[in-house]
Amino acid sequence: MKNILVKSSGDITDITDSQQFFNFVVEKAKENYVVVICGGGTKISAALEKAGYAVKYDELGRRVTRTWGERMIMRDVLEYEERKLQDKFVGKGVIVVPPILYAGSALCPINGDDLVKSYDLGFDEIYVFTTKGRIEKKKAVFKEWPKVEVIGI
């Protein structure tokens, strides 16, 4: 049995070809321990803008949040995405987690790609699902992480 980590862009779960992602995860879970990190970047940006926050990014392209209100919005979107995936994987042996860390009681949303890198040592195989238009960008993000396979759908 292998430990397998799969990170999914939040946009993947909303496209017609998402069945490829779900089938892949379920197949891997038949004989392995599978953890899925749900994404939600596009939806987080939209929710922040709708709430009146200016969406800012650092030099690595990661969203910068400064206020408690922004972190609450991020948490709400990510937990919604988590529940959505959990519902799809009920009874399939798949664990779904959002990219949120807690330091004591401090809420720390983390970029999903950064969380994948943090979990590298604990997993035998790592897959990152993204949209076809983002494949090259994701490959660049993980170029120093040979265990990570980027899959575009």
Image: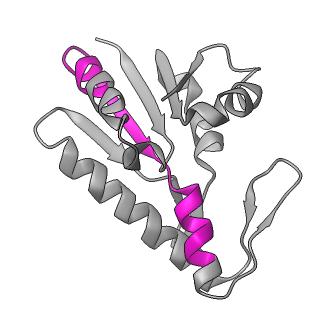
In the picture as drawn, the residue positioned furthest to the front comes out as 16
Residue 67: in magenta span: no
Q: Residue at x 70, y 25 (%)?
A: 139
Query: On the rendered image, what quadrant is the N terminus found in?
Result: top left
Foreground: 108 or 51? 51
57 relative to 65 in the view: left or right: right
Question: What colouring method underlies this structural image?
Answer: one colour
In the picture as drawn, the residue positioned furthest to the left comes out as 91
Task: Measuring from the top left, give residue 98's x and y in whole percent.
Answer: 44, 53
Question: Residue 48 falls in which quadrant of the image?
Answer: bottom right
Task: Measuring from the top left, give residue 85's x and y in whole percent.
Answer: 29, 48
In the picture as drawn, the residue positioned furthest to the right comes out as 59
In the picture as drawn, the residue positioned furthest to the bottom comes out as 52
Q: Relative to 45, does residue 40 appear above or below in the rendering?
A: above
Task: Measuring from the top left, give residue 55's x and y in whole percent.
Answer: 74, 72
Q: Residue at x 59, y 83 (%)?
A: 50
* Residue 35 can be seen, yes or no: yes
Q: Residue at x 38, y 46 (%)?
A: 13
Q: Relative to 53, does residue 83 appear above or below in the rendering?
A: above
Q: Residue at x 47, y 50 (%)?
A: 10
Count the labels in the image: 0
The residue stretch that appears in magenta: 25-48
Q: Relative to 80, does residue 119 appear above or below in the rendering?
A: above
Question: Residue 62 falls in which quadrant of the image?
Answer: bottom right
89 relative to 5 in the view: left or right: left
129 relative to 85 in the view: left or right: right
Task: Measuring from the top left, give residue 25's x and y in whole percent.
Answer: 31, 27
* Residue 103 can be seen, yes or no: no
Residue 44: in magenta span: yes
61 relative to 92 in the view: left or right: right
Foreground: 81 or 46? 46
